[in-house]
Image (tube, grey):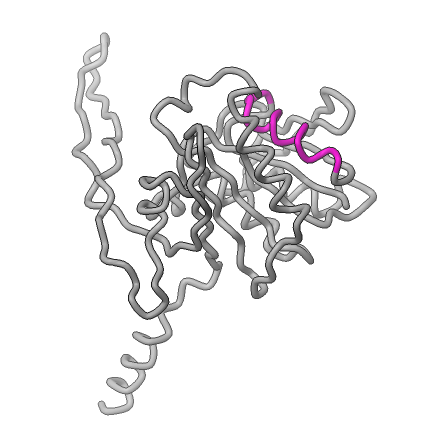
Amino acid sequence: MNILIANDDGVFAPGIQALAEALKPLGRVVVVAPESERSGYSSALTLDRPLRPIQIAPDIWSVNGTPADCVYLSMNGMFDFEFDLVVSGINSGANLGDDVLYSGTVGAAFEGRLMKHPAIAVSLAGPNVRTYEHPADYAQAAQWVHDFIRSGLPQVPPRHILNINIPDVEQIQGVQLTYQGRRLQSKPITSHVDPRGRQVYWIGLAGEAVTDPKKSQQNLQSDFFAIANGCISITPIQMDATNYEVLTTLARQFHAN
Protein backbone atom coordinates (compact mmCIF):
# COMPACT_ATOMS: atom_id res chain seq x y z
CA MET A 1 0.00 0.00 0.00
CA ASN A 2 1.20 3.52 -0.85
CA ILE A 3 0.06 5.88 1.90
CA LEU A 4 0.10 9.67 1.62
CA ILE A 5 0.21 11.61 4.89
CA ALA A 6 -0.54 15.33 5.12
CA ASN A 7 -1.58 17.71 7.90
CA ASP A 8 -2.17 21.36 8.72
CA ASP A 9 0.32 21.67 11.61
CA GLY A 10 3.36 21.61 9.35
CA VAL A 11 5.85 19.04 8.12
CA PHE A 12 7.85 19.10 11.38
CA ALA A 13 4.86 18.68 13.69
CA PRO A 14 5.21 15.80 16.16
CA GLY A 15 1.79 14.41 15.28
CA ILE A 16 2.65 13.76 11.65
CA GLN A 17 6.02 12.29 12.61
CA ALA A 18 4.36 9.83 15.00
CA LEU A 19 1.78 8.87 12.39
CA ALA A 20 4.36 8.29 9.66
CA GLU A 21 6.44 6.06 11.91
CA ALA A 22 3.42 4.03 13.02
CA LEU A 23 2.17 3.41 9.47
CA LYS A 24 5.49 2.30 7.95
CA PRO A 25 4.79 -1.43 8.54
CA LEU A 26 1.74 -1.10 6.24
CA GLY A 27 3.67 -0.06 3.12
CA ARG A 28 5.40 2.94 1.62
CA VAL A 29 4.62 6.10 3.57
CA VAL A 30 5.12 9.48 1.90
CA VAL A 31 4.75 12.70 3.89
CA VAL A 32 3.80 15.85 1.98
CA ALA A 33 2.89 18.68 4.34
CA PRO A 34 2.97 22.48 4.60
CA GLU A 35 6.29 24.08 5.46
CA SER A 36 4.66 25.75 8.48
CA GLU A 37 1.35 25.66 10.32
CA ARG A 38 -1.69 26.20 8.11
CA SER A 39 -4.54 25.60 10.55
CA GLY A 40 -7.96 26.96 9.56
CA TYR A 41 -7.33 26.78 5.80
CA SER A 42 -10.10 24.24 5.17
CA SER A 43 -9.93 23.08 1.52
CA ALA A 44 -8.23 26.23 0.20
CA LEU A 45 -5.99 25.83 -2.86
CA THR A 46 -3.22 28.29 -3.77
CA LEU A 47 -4.04 29.80 -7.18
CA ASP A 48 -2.13 33.09 -7.16
CA ARG A 49 1.47 31.84 -7.05
CA PRO A 50 3.50 28.72 -7.87
CA LEU A 51 4.00 25.99 -5.33
CA ARG A 52 7.47 24.67 -4.52
CA PRO A 53 7.79 21.17 -3.05
CA ILE A 54 11.15 20.61 -1.34
CA GLN A 55 12.36 17.13 -0.36
CA ILE A 56 13.82 17.38 3.12
CA ALA A 57 14.35 13.64 3.70
CA PRO A 58 13.55 10.40 1.87
CA ASP A 59 9.77 10.38 1.24
CA ILE A 60 9.29 13.61 3.21
CA TRP A 61 8.34 16.77 1.32
CA SER A 62 7.66 20.33 2.43
CA VAL A 63 5.32 22.57 0.39
CA ASN A 64 4.87 26.34 0.56
CA GLY A 65 1.10 26.00 0.45
CA THR A 66 -2.03 24.76 2.17
CA PRO A 67 -2.90 21.26 3.40
CA ALA A 68 -5.17 20.73 0.39
CA ASP A 69 -2.35 21.90 -1.93
CA CYS A 70 -0.15 19.13 -0.57
CA VAL A 71 -2.64 16.38 -1.37
CA TYR A 72 -3.64 17.91 -4.71
CA LEU A 73 -0.03 18.03 -5.91
CA SER A 74 0.68 14.51 -4.67
CA MET A 75 -2.31 13.02 -6.47
CA ASN A 76 -1.95 14.96 -9.71
CA GLY A 77 1.52 14.38 -11.07
CA MET A 78 4.07 15.15 -8.38
CA PHE A 79 4.90 11.43 -8.13
CA ASP A 80 5.19 8.70 -10.75
CA PHE A 81 2.99 6.30 -8.78
CA GLU A 82 -0.50 6.39 -7.30
CA PHE A 83 -1.54 6.42 -3.67
CA ASP A 84 -3.95 3.94 -2.17
CA LEU A 85 -4.85 5.92 0.93
CA VAL A 86 -4.69 9.49 2.25
CA VAL A 87 -4.34 10.05 6.00
CA SER A 88 -4.39 13.61 7.34
CA GLY A 89 -3.05 14.23 10.84
CA ILE A 90 -2.44 13.63 13.59
CA ASN A 91 -3.80 17.09 14.31
CA SER A 92 -2.87 18.81 17.56
CA GLY A 93 -6.36 19.41 18.91
CA ALA A 94 -9.88 18.24 18.16
CA ASN A 95 -11.84 18.68 14.95
CA LEU A 96 -15.40 18.22 16.16
CA GLY A 97 -18.80 19.49 15.11
CA ASP A 98 -18.78 22.77 13.21
CA ASP A 99 -14.97 22.87 13.41
CA VAL A 100 -14.75 20.65 10.33
CA LEU A 101 -15.85 23.61 8.18
CA TYR A 102 -12.56 25.37 8.94
CA SER A 103 -10.23 22.46 9.52
CA GLY A 104 -7.18 22.14 7.29
CA THR A 105 -6.84 18.56 8.55
CA VAL A 106 -10.28 17.71 7.19
CA GLY A 107 -9.64 19.78 4.04
CA ALA A 108 -6.55 17.72 3.23
CA ALA A 109 -8.49 14.49 3.70
CA PHE A 110 -11.24 15.74 1.39
CA GLU A 111 -8.67 16.19 -1.37
CA GLY A 112 -8.16 12.44 -1.12
CA ARG A 113 -11.86 11.60 -1.26
CA LEU A 114 -11.55 9.85 -4.63
CA MET A 115 -9.12 7.24 -3.32
CA LYS A 116 -10.03 3.56 -3.67
CA HIS A 117 -9.90 3.42 0.12
CA PRO A 118 -11.62 6.08 2.26
CA ALA A 119 -9.47 9.06 3.13
CA ILE A 120 -9.29 9.73 6.87
CA ALA A 121 -8.68 12.80 9.01
CA VAL A 122 -7.24 12.11 12.47
CA SER A 123 -7.09 14.49 15.43
CA LEU A 124 -5.95 14.14 19.04
CA ALA A 125 -8.51 15.76 21.34
CA GLY A 126 -7.57 16.98 24.79
CA PRO A 127 -6.83 20.09 26.84
CA ASN A 128 -3.04 19.73 26.74
CA VAL A 129 -2.23 18.58 23.21
CA ARG A 130 -1.10 22.02 22.07
CA THR A 131 1.85 21.72 24.45
CA TYR A 132 3.02 18.34 23.16
CA GLU A 133 6.40 18.65 21.48
CA HIS A 134 7.47 15.06 20.80
CA PRO A 135 6.12 12.21 18.63
CA ALA A 136 5.92 10.04 21.76
CA ASP A 137 3.05 12.23 22.97
CA TYR A 138 1.02 11.00 19.96
CA ALA A 139 2.21 7.39 20.01
CA GLN A 140 -0.97 5.82 21.40
CA ALA A 141 -3.16 7.62 18.85
CA ALA A 142 -0.78 6.74 16.01
CA GLN A 143 -0.77 3.08 16.98
CA TRP A 144 -4.57 3.04 17.01
CA VAL A 145 -4.62 4.45 13.46
CA HIS A 146 -2.19 1.73 12.38
CA ASP A 147 -4.40 -0.98 13.87
CA PHE A 148 -7.55 0.57 12.38
CA ILE A 149 -6.10 0.55 8.87
CA ARG A 150 -4.52 -2.90 9.21
CA SER A 151 -7.83 -4.42 10.33
CA GLY A 152 -9.48 -3.28 7.09
CA LEU A 153 -11.06 0.11 6.53
CA PRO A 154 -14.86 0.21 6.38
CA GLN A 155 -16.48 0.96 3.05
CA VAL A 156 -18.04 4.39 2.58
CA PRO A 157 -19.73 5.92 -0.49
CA PRO A 158 -17.68 7.96 -2.98
CA ARG A 159 -16.85 11.54 -1.98
CA HIS A 160 -16.99 10.67 1.72
CA ILE A 161 -14.22 10.67 4.31
CA LEU A 162 -13.94 9.48 7.89
CA ASN A 163 -13.31 12.18 10.49
CA ILE A 164 -11.66 10.52 13.50
CA ASN A 165 -11.04 12.15 16.87
CA ILE A 166 -9.03 10.29 19.50
CA PRO A 167 -9.28 11.40 23.14
CA ASP A 168 -6.10 12.21 24.99
CA VAL A 169 -6.68 9.79 27.86
CA GLU A 170 -4.63 7.00 29.39
CA GLN A 171 -7.35 4.40 28.83
CA ILE A 172 -9.60 4.76 25.78
CA GLN A 173 -13.14 3.68 26.68
CA GLY A 174 -14.13 2.38 23.25
CA VAL A 175 -15.02 3.50 19.75
CA GLN A 176 -18.28 5.21 18.80
CA LEU A 177 -19.77 5.90 15.40
CA THR A 178 -21.01 9.47 15.77
CA TYR A 179 -22.80 12.27 14.01
CA GLN A 180 -21.33 15.74 13.61
CA GLY A 181 -22.22 17.88 16.60
CA ARG A 182 -22.62 21.63 16.70
CA ARG A 183 -21.49 24.62 18.70
CA LEU A 184 -23.14 27.71 20.05
CA GLN A 185 -22.25 31.05 18.48
CA SER A 186 -18.55 31.94 18.65
CA LYS A 187 -17.26 34.22 21.38
CA PRO A 188 -17.10 37.96 20.49
CA ILE A 189 -14.06 39.32 18.73
CA THR A 190 -11.45 41.14 20.82
CA SER A 191 -10.44 44.63 19.72
CA HIS A 192 -7.09 46.30 20.45
CA VAL A 193 -5.07 49.28 19.27
CA ASP A 194 -1.58 48.38 18.09
CA PRO A 195 1.55 50.46 18.95
CA ARG A 196 1.04 52.52 15.79
CA GLY A 197 -2.50 53.46 16.70
CA ARG A 198 -4.25 51.09 14.30
CA GLN A 199 -7.35 49.12 15.28
CA VAL A 200 -6.77 45.34 15.21
CA TYR A 201 -9.02 42.41 16.01
CA TRP A 202 -8.60 38.87 17.29
CA ILE A 203 -11.09 36.24 16.17
CA GLY A 204 -13.08 35.03 19.19
CA LEU A 205 -12.88 31.54 20.67
CA ALA A 206 -15.19 28.82 19.38
CA GLY A 207 -18.60 28.55 21.01
CA GLU A 208 -19.45 25.87 23.54
CA ALA A 209 -20.53 22.45 22.32
CA VAL A 210 -24.28 21.89 22.27
CA THR A 211 -25.43 18.89 24.28
CA ASP A 212 -27.85 17.29 21.84
CA PRO A 213 -30.02 14.34 22.75
CA LYS A 214 -28.93 11.17 21.02
CA LYS A 215 -30.28 10.36 17.57
CA SER A 216 -32.86 7.87 18.78
CA GLN A 217 -33.48 6.30 15.37
CA GLN A 218 -29.95 4.91 15.18
CA ASN A 219 -29.02 5.27 18.86
CA LEU A 220 -26.11 7.56 17.95
CA GLN A 221 -24.36 10.25 19.95
CA SER A 222 -22.47 13.31 18.74
CA ASP A 223 -18.71 13.46 18.27
CA PHE A 224 -18.53 15.85 21.24
CA PHE A 225 -20.30 13.29 23.44
CA ALA A 226 -17.90 10.50 22.46
CA ILE A 227 -14.79 12.54 23.25
CA ALA A 228 -16.24 13.81 26.53
CA ASN A 229 -16.71 10.18 27.58
CA GLY A 230 -13.22 9.02 26.64
CA CYS A 231 -14.25 7.28 23.41
CA ILE A 232 -12.82 7.53 19.91
CA SER A 233 -15.26 9.28 17.57
CA ILE A 234 -15.62 8.18 13.94
CA THR A 235 -17.89 10.37 11.80
CA PRO A 236 -18.50 9.84 8.08
CA ILE A 237 -18.76 13.24 6.37
CA GLN A 238 -19.39 14.09 2.75
CA MET A 239 -18.65 16.69 0.10
CA ASP A 240 -22.30 16.97 -0.95
CA ALA A 241 -23.77 19.48 1.50
CA THR A 242 -27.20 19.52 -0.16
CA ASN A 243 -30.13 19.07 2.23
CA TYR A 244 -32.32 16.84 0.09
CA GLU A 245 -35.26 16.93 2.50
CA VAL A 246 -35.39 20.73 2.31
CA LEU A 247 -34.76 20.56 -1.44
CA THR A 248 -37.87 18.39 -1.85
CA THR A 249 -39.94 20.76 0.31
CA LEU A 250 -38.76 23.79 -1.68
CA ALA A 251 -39.52 22.01 -4.94
CA ARG A 252 -43.12 21.44 -3.82
CA GLN A 253 -43.43 25.12 -2.90
CA PHE A 254 -42.06 26.27 -6.26
CA HIS A 255 -44.33 23.90 -8.19
CA ALA A 256 -47.32 25.04 -6.13
CA ASN A 257 -46.65 28.61 -7.25
Residue sitting farthest toward the right: 80
What residue appears at the point 62 percent right and 37 percent down from the top-left corner? 70
- Location of residue 80 by image quarter: top right
| Residue 172 percent location from the top left of the image | 45, 37
Query: Observer-nearest residue: 49 or 215?
Result: 215
**Residue 113 image position (x, y, % from top left):** 59, 54
Q: Residue at x 54, y 50 (%)?
A: 110
Within the image, what quadrant is residue 57 found in?
A: top right
The x, y position of residue 107, in whole percent, is 50, 45
Q: Magenta segment range?
A: 12-25
Residue that appears at 36% across and 46% down = 226
x and y percent of residue 252 in the render? 28, 87
What kind of secondary structure does the magenta stretch mostly adopt? helix
Q: Is residue 60 left or right of residue 139?
A: right
User: Based on the displayed image, in which of its 4 quarters is residue 48 positioned?
Assistant: top right
The vertical placement of 184 against 127, above or below, is: below
124 lies above or below 56: below
Q: Nearer the viewer, residue 220 or 67?
A: 220
184 lies above or below 154: above
